[in-house]
Image (cartoon, helix red, strand yellow):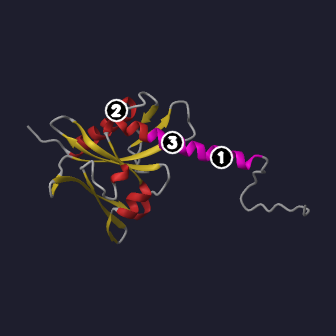
C-alpha cells in the first residue's frame, strides 16, 4: 500500500477548508469556489452569498505534523514563492492549519492571516528570485506569539471570513458615497474649469 502523496494531502486540506467555510458559523453564508487555474496562487475563493463584488482569495497551507516546543507544540509550514508571484492584497489571505490524519480534521487553532502579514513576518530568506517563508505559530490557545491574533477554532473560520468581507464591503460603500457627484474620466485626462 502506498503512502499519502503531497498532492493528495494538499487537495484534501483545501477541500476541508472549503467545508469549514461552508458549514462553519454562520452556516451557509459563504459561497466557496475552487479556481480552475492556479496562476494567481488562489486555492479557494469565497464571497458572501448574493454579494458578488467582494471576494476573499485563500492560499491553503496545511501540515500533518506538529513540532514540540517546551511544554507545547508549534505549527510550522515552510514554502517558497517566486518574487513575481508574490501577492500582497487586502483580499488575499493565507490559511494555516494542522491536519490530524487520525481524526481527518484540522486541530484547533487554525490561522487566517492577511498576505501582507505573512509576507513581512514569516520571511525566512530571499534567494535571488525566490522568497522562502517559514510560518511558525504556537498551538497553545494562551500563547502571545505574533500570529496569535489570527488564531481561531476551525468552526469560527467562516465567521472570520465574513467579518473581513463585510469590513471591505463597508469601506467600498463609504468610498462610493464620498465619490458621488464625481466625474469618472479616463486616465491622463485633465479637467479644466473656473475657480469657484
- Crowding near the residue tagged with mark 2, few <14, some 14–19, many ≥20 C-alpha atoms within 10 Å: few
Residue 188's spot in the image, x, y percent? 73, 62
Q: Residue at x 90, y 64 (%)?
A: 195
The reply to whether residue 175 is in sight is yes
**Is residue 169 on the magenta stretch?**
yes
Q: Is residue 30 left or right of residue 108?
A: right
Q: Which residue is mark 1?
A: 174
Circles 3 and 1, Cβ within 8 Å, touching? The answer is no
Pick whichever of labels 2 and 3 is earlier in the sequence: 2
Determine the secondary structure under disc 3: helix
Q: Residue at x 28, y 44 (%)?
A: 109
Residue 141's spot in the image, x, y percent? 27, 47
Q: Which residues are magenta?
A: 161-180
Q: Which residue is mark 2?
A: 19
- Crowding near the residue tagged with mark 3, few <14, some 14–19, many ≥20 C-alpha atoms within 10 Å: many
Q: Nearer the viewer, mark 2 or mark 3?
A: 3
Q: Residue at x 12, y 42 (%)?
A: 3
- Up-down relation of residue 37 to residue 15 (above or below): below
CA–CA distance between discs 3 and 1?
A: 14 Å
Circles 2 and 3, Cβ within 8 Å, touching? The answer is no
Decide which of 134, 150 is in the foreground and name it.
150
The reply to whether residue 55 is in sight is no
Determine the secondary structure under disc 2: helix
Quadrant of the drawing holding the N terminus: top left
Quadrant of the drawing holding the C terminus: bottom right
Amino acid at each position: 500500500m502506498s503512502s499519502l502523496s503531497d498532492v493528495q494531502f494538499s487537495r484534501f486540506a483545501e477541500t476541508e477548508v472549503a467545508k469549514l467555510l461552508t458549514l462553519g458559523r454562520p452556516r451557509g453564508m459563504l459561497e466557496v469556489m475552487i479556481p480552475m487555474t492556479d496562476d494567481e496562487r488562489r486555492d479557494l475563493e469565497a464571497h458572501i452569498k448574493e454579494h458578488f463584488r467582494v471576494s476573499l482569495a485563500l492560499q491553503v497551507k496545511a501540515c500533518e505534523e506538529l513540532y514540540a516546543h517546551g511544554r507545547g507544540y508549534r505549527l510550522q509550514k515552510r514554502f517558497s514563492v517566486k518574487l513575481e508571484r508574490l501577492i500582497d492584497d487586502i483580499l488575499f489571505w493565507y490559511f494555516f492549519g494542522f491536519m490530524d490524519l487520525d481524526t481527518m480534521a484540522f486541530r484547533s487553532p487554525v490561522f487566517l492571516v492577511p498576505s501582507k502579514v505573512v509576507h513581512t513576518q514569516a520571511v525566512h530568506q530571499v534567494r535571488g528570485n525566490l522568497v522562502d517563508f517559514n510560518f511558525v505559530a504556537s498551538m497553545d490557545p494562551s500563547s502571545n506569539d505574533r500570529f496569535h491574533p489570527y488564531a481561531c477554532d476551525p468552526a469560527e473560520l467562516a465567521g472570520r471570513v465574513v467579518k473581513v468581507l463585510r469590513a471591505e464591503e463597508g469601506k467600498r460603500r463609504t468610498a462610493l458615497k464620498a465619490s458621488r457627484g464625481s466625474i469618472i474620466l479616463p486616465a491622463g485626462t485633465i479637467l479644466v474649469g473656473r475657480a469657484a
